[in-house]
Amino acid sequence: MQRNKRARNDADQLEIDDRKFIWHPFTQMQDYVAETPLIIERAKGSYLYDIRGRRYLDGVSSLWVTVHGHRKRALDSAVRKQISMVAHSTLLGISNVPAVKLAKMLAERAPKGLTKVFYSDNGSTAVEVGLKMAFQYWRQHRSGSHKKRTKFICFENAYHGDTIGSVGVGGIDLFHEMYRPLLMESIRVPAPYCYRCEKNRNRPHSSEEKNGVCSCFSCIQAVEQALREHAGEVAALVIEPLVHAAGGIIVQPPGYLKRIRELCTRYGVLMITDEVAVGIGRTGTMFACEREDISPDILAIAKGLTGGYLPVAATLTTEEIYSGFLGAYDEFRTLFHGHTYTGNPLGCAAAIANLEIFDREQTLKKVRKKAELLERLLRPLAELHHVGDIRQCGLMVGIELVKDKNSREPYDYSEKMGIRVIMEARRRGMIIRPLGNVIVLMPHLTFSPAQLERMVAITRVSIETVTQT
C-alpha cells in the first residue's frame, strides 16, 4: 500500500514537472499544459507503458523510428557491448570501429554508386549535409563554369527537417513560412499528387497514367519546365522518394521517381533523395529508391537507422562528388561541416545490429506481406463518411479526414479533428499522431497480424466516435 502511494506521488510530481519545465516540439503548449501529460516509463515489443502502468500500442513507431520493436535483445546487447569499449570518440581526423563497419554495410546495401558515407545526428542534418555537398561541389568544380549553381528545386508540401538549410527546401507553409526571411532561395514545383488538378481530384492516378507516369501538369511537366528554365543555376533537386511523409503521406504515382531521375540526368542537375522517413525497410525495400531501381547522387538517411535506439544519420554520395572535395590543404576544398557526435560508436553499433537483424530475420520479405494485409484491413475504412482518402505505401499510412467525402471539404484546423481522433485512440490504448487532418499509422515492421488488426480497429472506432458516424 505504502509503495503504491509513493508511486502515485512520484507520478503526480513528474506530471507537474513536465508541464513546468519542458517545451515540447510541434506542440501548442497552451493546450498541452491544460491536459494531463502522457509520460512513458518503459517499453517492450510493440507496447509503451506510462508512469501509471497503462499500456499503449505504439502505432507511430515512436515518431517513425522504432523498427524491430522496443528492447530488442540483439540491439540491447550491441549497445551494452559497445559501452564496455568506448561510448564516444570524435570522427574529426580519426575514426572508430563501429563507424567504419557501419559505413561499409551502408555502402554495400545502398543504391548503386553511393560509396561514401558522411555521418551526422538526425534527418535534418543529413539533408543539410547533402545540400552543402551539392552547393560546394559546383562552387569548386574544376571547370570553373558552374558557380551560378546556387539554387535548389524542391516540392510544395515537402518536409526535409527543421534546421535552416533543410527548412529552405521545405514546402509546408504551416511549418516553414515563418522562417522565409532566413532562408536561401529555392525553386518550388507542385507536389506529385493531383489535389490542385480539378479534373483528377476524385480520381486515382492510374486513370491519368501514360507509360506508368501520371501525365498531369502537377506531377511531371512543372518539374521539367523548372529544370529547363533554371538548370544552369540549380545545384540539385531534393525529393522524398515514393512518399511525401510529413506532408500528409502523399504517395507518388508509379514511375514518377524514375522520371525525375531521368530529368535530373538530362539537365545535369544533382538528385538528392531524402530517405529519412521512407528508408530502412519502411516501404518494403531497404531504401525507397530501390522500388523504382534508381540511384540518386546524394541520399540522406536517419530515423530507423539505429532501430530507434540512438540518434545517428548518414549522407551517402558518389565517388565523383567526393573527389570534388579533394585537393591540397591550402586549397580549402574540405567539406567544412561536422557535429560533435558524428559517427558516435554507440549509435553505430546499434545501427550495425539493426541491419544484421534485417538479414537474419528476413524482415523485408515479412514487411511486404504485412503491407498487403494492412491494405486489406484498411479498405472498409474508405466507406466512412468522413474519410476522404486512404494513402498507403508499405507500412506508411495516411487517413485523411474530411467534413464530407463527396465534396472533400476539409475540416477547419480550429476543429482539431486530427488531435481529437488521436486522443480518442490514446484512451483506447494506442499512441498515434496526426498531420493536421491526416491520421498517420506507422507500425513497427515487426507488428503481428493481430496487432495490425487492433491498430486499424482502434483507428476506425476513434474516427467514428469523434466524427459521430
Image (cartoon, rainbow, N blue to C red):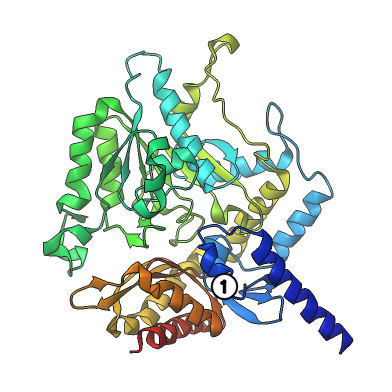
Depth check: give the residue in front, 100 or 345: 345
Q: Position of residue 27 (x, y in %)?
A: 52, 62
Corner quadrant of residue 417: bottom left
> In percent of the image, x 19 and y 31: which residue is there?
229
Depth check: give the residue in front, 281 or 467: 467
Q: Is residue 82 left or right of residue 448?
A: right
**Residue with the most extreme left position:** 199
Q: Is residue 114 above or below residue 290?
A: above
Corner quadrant of residue 298: top left
Residue bearing mark 1: 34
Q: Position of residue 76 (x, y in %)?
A: 74, 61
> In percent of the image, x 31 and y 70: which residue is there?
412
Local crowd size for mark 1, using a 10 Å CA cut-off: few (<14), some (14–19), many (≥20): few
**Residue with the most extreme right position:** 2
Corner quadrant of residue 154: top left
| Circle 1: element type | loop
Q: Is residue 13 above or below residue 355?
A: below
Q: Position of residue 35 (x, y in %)?
A: 58, 75
Judge whether residue 112 can be spotted in this image: no
Figure disc tally: 1
Q: Position of residue 111 (x, y in %)?
A: 44, 44
> In percent of the image, x 17 and y 65: which residue is there?
201
Judge whether residue 97 can be spotted in this image: yes
Q: Amino acid at mark 1?
A: Ala
Q: Quadrant of the N terminus?
A: bottom right
Q: Quadrant of the C terminus?
A: bottom left
Depth check: give the residue in front, 210 or 91: 91
